[in-house]
Image (cartoon, helix red, strand yellow):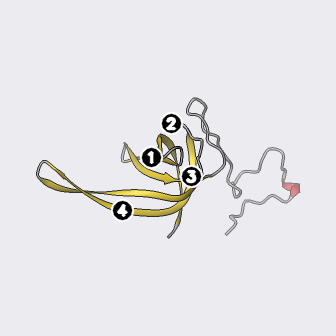
Amino acid sequence: MAIVKVNGSISRTFFDGKGAEVVESWQQGGETRTKRWAAFFEQPHGLSEGDQVEVSGMHGDKVDQWEKEGQTMHTIKRTLNKARVVGSASSSAAPAATREEPWATTAPANSGAAQGYNDETPF
């Protein structure tokens, strides 16, 4: 199984605080797209609906089959098993914290070129 990181918001919690649905959103072709993930934790996570989070876990998919208006429909249920919150959750009332990638191409304000900063990517 692959380890996956998902950035999104908590839409609901379940299983006595050991499960959460994480919804990630992005823009594509002028439309907002979403993907839902069920995250299963080994311990209660303490997350609330609306929290902005980054969650990692073991990726799993399951095909779900159901009937609608006489047609057989299929959906994929995406899961993160043994999930963990990366960093800390932020409330939807506060803007999500931004973080600078370690290979950013602009020097931090207090670094100065004399401190060995370069703009080479780390790989």
Q: CA distance from mark 3 to mark 2?
A: 14 Å
Left or right relative to 43: residue 64? left
The residue beneath circle 4 is 62
The residue sitting at 44% across, 63% down in the picture is 60
Q: CA distance from mark 1 to mark 4?
A: 23 Å
Dot 3: few (<14), some (14–19), or many (≥20) neighbours within 10 Å? Answer: many
Residue 80 is situated, as x and y percent measured from the top left of the image, at 49, 58
**Please, what is the three-letter code of the amino acid marked with disc 2?**
Glu
Q: Earlier in the sequence, mark 1 or mark 2?
A: 1
Query: In the rendered image, which residue does mark 2 sit on?
Result: 49
* Local SS, label 2: loop
- 117 to 19, vertically: above or below: below
- Which residue was labeled with disc 1? 26
The number of numbered badges drawn on the structure is: 4
* Residue 105 placement (x, y as % from top left): 69, 54
Farthest-out residue, front: 16
Can you tell which mark lies on residue 15? none
Q: Which residue is mark 3?
A: 55
